[in-house]
Amino acid sequence: MHIHPDARSVVRALAPDEPVILNRPHAAERAARFFVEKFPGKSLYAVKANPSPDLLQILWNGGVTHFDVASIAEVRLVRAMLPEATLCFMHPVKTPRAIREAYFEHGVKTFSLDTIEELAKIVEATTAEDGTPAADLRLLVRLRVSSDYSELSLASKFGVDLVDAAPLLQATRQHCDWLGVCFHVGSQAMTPFAYVQALERVRAAVAEASVVIDVVDVGGGFPSVYPDMEPPPLEDYFEVIHRHFENLPIAYNAELWCEPGRALCAEYSSVVVRVEKRRGDELYINDGAYGALFDAAHVDWRFPVAALEDDLRDSPQEFAFYGPTCDDADYMKGPFMLPGDIQAGDYIEIGMLGAYGAAMKTGFNGFGNAQQIVVGDEPMASLYRGDRERPATDNVVSLR
């Protein structure tokens, strides 16, 4: 397999008409080893962030053995790729057929839920044909927690309210070998305090239910580095989580889990695009809202950018992007900082797209083709190289 040195070398070699996704296996494996070695528990990769088979193998090689799957398609994908992996079906709303296939055909024992109806569905779907109920289930009750300290909220769709959690925990305890509590603080949590607040809700729920808890899963939300989003070091998150986990009223041998998605794969990929037209401070590029830049369009996410031409001399200025489709919604307001003399025919690298970028691509309007190439240079930003200046924090519990 040929490895190009960097984005500029790709442009010089190919002068591509279509977007090119640049993958950095070394960055993803480094992130995996970081979580495996430093998080004080098990790290489950959230497959939805990027289900690339190549990436799944890289993370496995980096020591990640547990995977958070959210659909039967993800169950099938990971089981086919990694027969020895531990799969945890963490979507709180599943079809009976998906539960049954996951349990009986793929060996999935761990499921999440947030209602009594979902509990009944899981119990029925995992019962053998002779009427024998499953005796090896690991069931995690998802608790609704705040997303106030995260850039993208995940607080409204899933999770049992604290006032209703105790009866559900008590009922679930009757049907499982392991009982757990899980939550999700939202995507891109910018302070460890997000987990402090959530773990205090876990404490209250467990105390009221008076049940034995075997696992606490703090979910995802671990951040990456983007323009104007400089989180504290991940070690600060790990330390705070571990300290508060140790003080919970749970079994002495209870396990601590997390579900990183973005933090494991954001640095894996970038995309090279070409400017097809310039109109003032708007650049028409050949990828966009229906491609790898979904988040840039729909949630105004700002990704790092770099012009790849050697002859641009003007100082940086703010630009917005239009994607290649005929839809006015194919617009990314940025601002993206690029040289003021950039023009049609020039190439741009857009970084930190390993999380959700490739996963969200569509073929709308006939666009969406993108060659994938491996490069050997470093991602535009990294939490794992050890060269970041430590951002100022208020004793790592900033109320930002």
Image: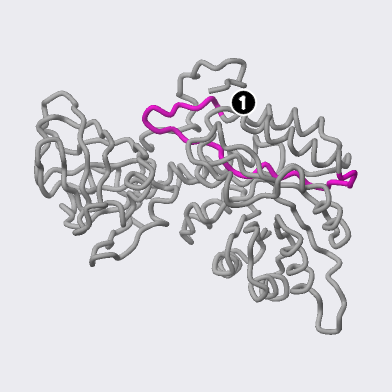
263 relative position to 101: left or right: left
Residue drawn at point x = 89 percent, y = 46 percent: 212
In the rendered image, residue 100 lying in the magenta stretch gets the answer no
Residue 376 horizontal/vertical position (percent): 36, 43
Q: Is residue 322 above or below residue 367?
A: above
Majority secondary structure of magenta residues: loop
User: Which residue appears at 40% of the width and 33% of the height?
Assistant: 226
- Amino acid carrying label 1: it is Asp
Magenta segment:
209-233
Residue sitting at x 12%, y 50% = 276
Q: Which residue is labeled 1 in the image?
A: 236
Q: In the rendered image, which quarter contains the N terminus?
A: bottom left
- Residue toward you, 139 or 18: 139
Q: In this rendering, would 153 be left or right of 103?
A: left
Residue lying furthest bottom in this view? 130
The x, y position of residue 331, in whole percent, is: 25, 47
The location of residue 350, given as percent across then percent down, is 30, 42
